[in-house]
Image (tube, rainbow, N blue to C red):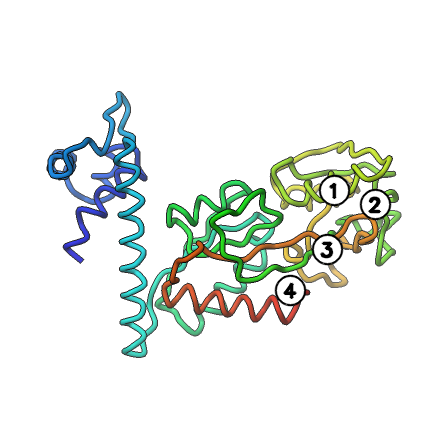
Amino acid sequence: MKHLLPLIYIDTIAKSGSIRKAAEVLSITSTALNRRVLAMEEELGVPIFERLARGVRPTTAGEILIHHIRGQLTDMDRVKSQIADLSGERRGHVSIACSQALLPYFLPEQVSTYRVEHPAVTFSVLLRDRTAAEQALVDFSADLVLVFEPVRMLKFQTLLNIRQPLHAVLATDHPLAKQQTVRLRECLEYPVALPTAEFGVRHLLESAVRRTSLNLSPAVVSDSFEFLRSHAVTENIITFQIPIGLPSLDEKSKYVSPLVDIRDVPPGLLYFGQLRGRTLPVAAARFAQQMMEYFEARFDCY
């Protein structure tokens, strides 16, 4: 909508960090875009952006304006989605910020299922760690968040908490492979590969070890669960993951994933939610409902 163009211009500049780069995205000249910014700054009576040698960054006033702009653009998306619903043609866009464990299997299946029924709905799936997830809600880059063991979520409205017990991941010929449940002390008798400190799985393990005399000394550390899972097979080493980050296993699988005894490592929580006080666009709200139904059918939730 044309009346939103000035807002879109400012938002794009803020995301690009450069008037020139934003002009390329918007398919207008940088001179014309700069005139738009100067006109808005004159109207407000304060600079929106601080001009730097290699781009621009928002001033304090600019940050306030950009937060307001993103709220306005998000509200308009919700209105357009509701209007589309009146005609029986559900459109819209859904943006999700999530922990890495959700990316390989769970979200591809959920997005695909939703788009079979509503092919006009588009999606953005953003990888955000435990500290960045809430910011994605606050700056409206995400409608929904799925994050495992978040650090803090002051502006987060919980839609559902999903319990996720820890599983060991090991090759089918590992000495512990035939056990359905393993003790943590058994796992730590062998070399282990662990995620880096910012991940919830590492947080669960470190919390569990602090209550014991065990020692957590990984042979390999990575910020990629895909690498850790593959390395468990390649080196016959043990790593760890939560159920939602594991594929369905069959007789052709090269690894198994026994449960780590909950007496040693209590289940962690996957938090599913949105920005507190926000009314979601129709498409995002419907997708949230689909995921909650899936979680409640498969996992222990509250």
Looking at the rendered structure, the kind of residue marked 2 is: Leu
Q: Which residue is mark 1?
A: 205
163 and 116: which one is in front?
A: 163
How far across and down, in percent of the image, does residue 68 sit? 28, 47
N-terminal of the pair, mark 1 or mark 2, is 2
Q: Which residue is mark 2?
A: 184
Which of labels 2 and 4 is toward the front? 4
How far across and down, in percent of the image, does residue 20 sit? 22, 33
Q: Which mark is residue 165?
A: 3
Q: In the displayed structure, does residue 145 sit left or right of residue 301?
A: left
How far across and down, in percent of the image, does residue 245 sit? 64, 54
Q: Which mark is residue 301?
A: 4
Q: In the displayed structure, does residue 109 sit left or right of residue 172?
A: left
Q: In the displayed structure, does residue 191 sit left or right of residue 276?
A: right
Q: Secondary structure at mark 4?
A: loop
N-terminal of the pair, mark 1 or mark 3, is 3
